[in-house]
């Protein structure tokens, strides 16, 4: 029997709740499709700070590096905001990405037919939305040097450096073009080349890579225009290729097209080694422990893990189909405001998805 080693990182806030739901579904779908998942939980984020004094303990990083895939729920809590930046949960996430060499973040944004009315945008604007944000993840302003804070005669001065090399741009551009070949063959590269030298290099290098992908239609947008177009006509996009900072912002904007950020998964990949799969939402500490969380983004992240990280395509598709079946029936968590729907808690939603999975 095929066997895969999976590290689960429940993290903080609603993380343990949505992990519990997803763990049950993974156990069921693996049994149904004839393979075994060896699941081990590790401390990460705020819980790791409280227990180990670090958001990413060495033991956790080592387990992740030795796994076949990593499934992360969510991290973060305001109680850690006063810690030095290097001790905060979010720094642990950056260190994990660096430790696994995760340079490519894939965020699919698909409007499910049953949720067209749930979006804050008009149905005719979002009904055909099916796009993928490809975000560079280990370069740019989040990692650039020098950075820090100095004190001058005028007071404190803080600075960060946005920097990219040709190799970093080439690597992420190749990912975007490769995935576009399996979609609608359109790549929109987003930058700020009219004012940033680093963005001009980005645009120039993307053009170079495009020459080897003549069947792909390449376009360019400045990031401010791209943000506007995502709201005005989101269905025009297929694959959006962009840098770390711009991708962080645009992918969250795109997430709201679906009606709730609680619906969207993501995958972070390296050139080789385990990938990291996680919902795009945060830890939502305000509803933690209340059984109100929407577990679907976590479930769909697990589906991405099965399909992309473990090559268990049929099992991943089975999870996606179970989610769609539950949505079509009209079950929703409290993040949706639909009068005709039946609202469920986190664990109940998990049970309904499990029923749909086993009935298929």
Image (cartoon, grey):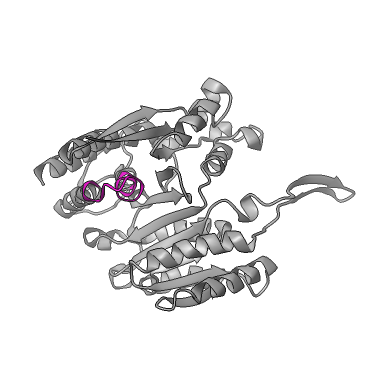
x then y, percent, for residue 254: 42, 61
In the depicted structure, whether residue 244 falls above or below residue 18: below
Q: Residue at x 53, y 52 (%)?
A: 137
For the point 34% across and 43% down, the residue is 298
Check if residue 312 falls in the magenta segment: yes
99 drawn magenta = no
For residue 197, which quarter of the picture?
bottom right
Please state the extent of the stretch shown in magenta in the rendering.
Answer: 301-315
Residue 91, image x, y percentages:
58, 39
Query: Main structural element of the magenta stretch: helix, strand or loop?
Result: helix
12 over 344 or under it: above or below: above
Q: Closer to the camera, 230 or 268?
A: 268
Residue nearest the observer in this picture, 329 or 163: 163
What is the quadrant of residue 214 in the picture?
bottom left
Residue 83, above or below 335: above
Residue 44 can be seen, yes or no: no
Q: Quadrant of the N terminus?
A: top left
């Amino acid at each position: 029997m095929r066997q895969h080693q999976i590290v689960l990182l429940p993290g903080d806030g609603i993380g343990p709740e949505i992990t519990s739901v997803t763990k049950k579904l993974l156990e069921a779908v693996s049994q149904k499709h004839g393979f075994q998942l060896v699941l081990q939980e590790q401390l990460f984020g705020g819980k790791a700070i409280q227990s180990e004094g670090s958001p990413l303990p060495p033991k956790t990083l080592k387990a992740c590096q030795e796994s076949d895939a990593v499934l992360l729920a969510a991290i973060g809590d305001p109680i850690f905001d006063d810690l030095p930046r290097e001790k905060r949960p979010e720094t642990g996430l950056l260190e994990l990405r660096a430790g696994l060499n995760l340079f490519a973040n894939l965020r699919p944004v698909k409007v499910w037919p049953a949720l067209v009315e749930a979006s804050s945008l008009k149905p005719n604007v979002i009904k055909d939305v099916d796009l993928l944000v490809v975000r560079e993840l280990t370069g740019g302003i989040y990692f650039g040097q020098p950075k820090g804070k100095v004190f001058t005669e005028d007071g404190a001065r803080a600075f960060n450096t946005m920097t990219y090399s040709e190799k970093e741009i080439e690597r992420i551009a190749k990912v975007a073009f490769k995935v576009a070949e399996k979609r609608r063959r359109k790549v929109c590269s987003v930058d700020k080349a009219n004012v940033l030298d680093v963005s001009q290099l980005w645009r120039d290098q993307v053009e170079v890579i495009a020459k080897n992908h003549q069947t792909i239609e390449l376009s360019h947008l400045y990031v401010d225009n791209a943000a506007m177009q995502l709201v005005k006509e989101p269905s025009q996009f297929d694959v959006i290729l962009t840098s770390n900072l711009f991708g962080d912002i645009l992918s969250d904007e795109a997430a709201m097209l679906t009606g709730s950020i609680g619906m969207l998964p993501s995958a972070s990949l390296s050139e080789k080694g385990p990938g990291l799969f996680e919902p795009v939402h945060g830890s939502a500490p305000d509803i933690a422990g209340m059984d109100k969380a929407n577990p679907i983004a976590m479930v769909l992240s697990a589906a991405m893990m099965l399909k992309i990280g473990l090559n268990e395509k049929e099992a991943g598709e089975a999870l996606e189909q179970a989610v769609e079946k539950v949505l079509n029936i009209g079950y929703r968590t409290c993040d949706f405001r639909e009068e005709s729907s039946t609202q469920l808690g986190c664990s109940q939603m998990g049970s309904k998805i499990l029923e749909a999975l086993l009935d298929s």
